[in-house]
Image (tube, rainbow, N blue to C red):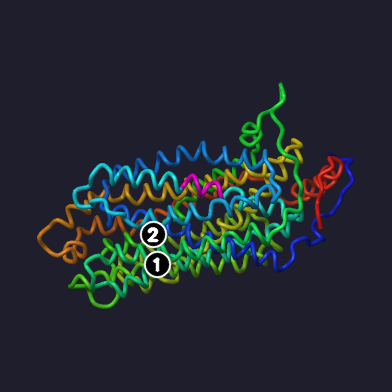
Amino acid sequence: MADTKVIKTEDKKYVPKKETQAYAIAALGQGLVYSCMSSYITDYYMNVLTLNAMFVIMLMLLARVWDAINDPMMGMIVDRHSTKRGRMKPYPLITAIPIAALTILMFVNPGFDTQNKSIWLYVFVSVVYVAWGMIYTASDVPFWSMPNVMTPNPKERGNLISYAKTVGGIGSAVTVALPIIVGYFVAGLPNADIVKYAVMAVSMSLIGMPLFTLSTFKTKERIQLPDAKKKQKGEVGTLKRIFTCKPLMLVVLSGVLSFGRYMLQAAAPHVARYSGMYVGQKPTTAAEYNSNISTVALIIQICAAIGMFGAMLFLPKLYKKFEYKQIMIVSCIGGFLASCLTLVIGWTTKNLLICIPFMLISSIPLGVINNVSFAMVCDCLDFMEWKTGFRNTGLGSACQSFVNKIGNAFATVMIIGMYMFIDLDVATLNSKAESIVNVAMNLEPFKQFGMFSLVTIVPGISLLLCAIPLFFYDLTGKKKQQVFSELAVLRKERGIEIDE
């Protein structure tokens, strides 16, 4: 590659502002819906439907095993077939209505008996959860593959991803806040949790999915990649190319180990219910208890949102001075230290408000990992194309989709596993003669500590583990610049068209 003529691709801008905004708004719509599932599904299953804990764990794990097959399959479909509308653009439009319908069904019980737990309730929950994951994959893989074909400029692509992820994060924050806010107004109702989750699922689905379809109508695929051909005899297979791409595998491993970043939001309702933390006076009635759940969860969620968005807003400036690898490692180590301080200070003082500065810092990696890891995957796809002559955009993005879903699954397993470890049986608590307020607010310290650890030391350790593979990631500096420069020449030689 040393004699190849160098072409700079980092000076030219391809994506106009309106198109960037349209793609980001589509990400906002996706974020509204995805956060419904990722932030609240465990609380809904465990504390509203009161499903068996082992069933929920097995459902999550088996669904992720299927995703290990489903995600790469979707990536291969995207790589092999184009349509008149483009290679990536049709899928958000095709999947919007099914995702909206399944999201609503995920949080709205159509009439199954939740008291006696008939087998049909478990069948219904399983079918809806697995179907949602499959349809979501069919939209998510091509949607986040779009930046790879919208511009050949790696810096512009990184900024496009960062902007879309930031705006999409606003969607997540809205979904996180909505049921908590609704919870204040329905705190005195006997079915308060059912009402708030129904309002969330219906409203976010009906708003989010129409926004998501903007990516079909308002974006342009400028890099016209040829359809993937069938494997020739003696040729290295697609999956082998992916698994032997060392930089990509390091990013994937780092992403899987960072599962704890999902726990600050997903575990907040559980911590609010059973950690014994309260703001103001200690709850003594059901209405005060439900209101306190909303208050504690809201504080944790707001800290997560501010830390995440703060990081996202500064990332474009950090990109100009530091490598992706450096940004990731520093933020993960800082998040770990802040999580340790949150645990020590929060548990010794029982004052959640004092913990706010440390929770803010521990939330910074949420924004960093969400944005930077995806940009790193795109760089790895460039590296693989430069090295092998093949670009598996869909399959590469499927790796990132799988990482996100496996991370959510691991976070869910950790939450439910904590219920089992500390022997916290929700069904038994609700069946006791004394008020659920007295039972929940006076749990043994060991159980309360276990629940509080779900938003402190558990995600902190996960962040520390996330940083380890990145020390071996070497697609940086001069090597990275060489890949991008020479790839522009190679694409021109192969006849790959790039529209203006």
Rounded to the nearest angstrom, the CA distance separating label 1 from label 2 is 8 Å
Task: Specify the segment rendered in magenta.
Answer: 133-139
The reply, left or right, for residue 224 in relation to residue 43 is right
Q: Which is nearer the eye, 74 or 467? A: 74
Where, quadrant-wise, is the C terminus in this rendering?
bottom right
* Residue depicted at x 82% and y 48%: 497
Q: Is there a contact, CB below 8 Å, between mark 1 and mark 2?
A: yes
Task: Reply above or below: 229 against 11.
Answer: above
Q: Amino acid at mark 1?
A: Ile
Which badge, 1 or 2, comes first in the chain's sequence? 1
The reply, left or right, for residue 265 in relation to residue 281 is right
Where residue 14 sits: x, y (%)?
A: 78, 60
Query: In terms of secondary structure, where does tag 1 sit?
Result: helix
**Which numbered disc covers residue 455?**
2
**Which numbered disc covers residue 300?**
1
Where residue 364 sits: x, y (%)?
A: 52, 63
Q: Is residue 455 magenta?
A: no
* Residue depicted at x 64% and y 57%: 216
The reply, left or right, for residue 1 in relation to residue 348 is right
**Which numbered disc covers residue 435?**
none
Q: Amino acid at mark 2?
A: Val
Where residue 253 sits: x, y (%)?
A: 54, 43
* Residue depicted at x 69% and y 51%: 85
Task: Reply above or below: 4 against 295.
Answer: above
Q: Is residue 134 magenta?
A: yes
Q: Which is nearer the eye, 300 or 338? A: 300
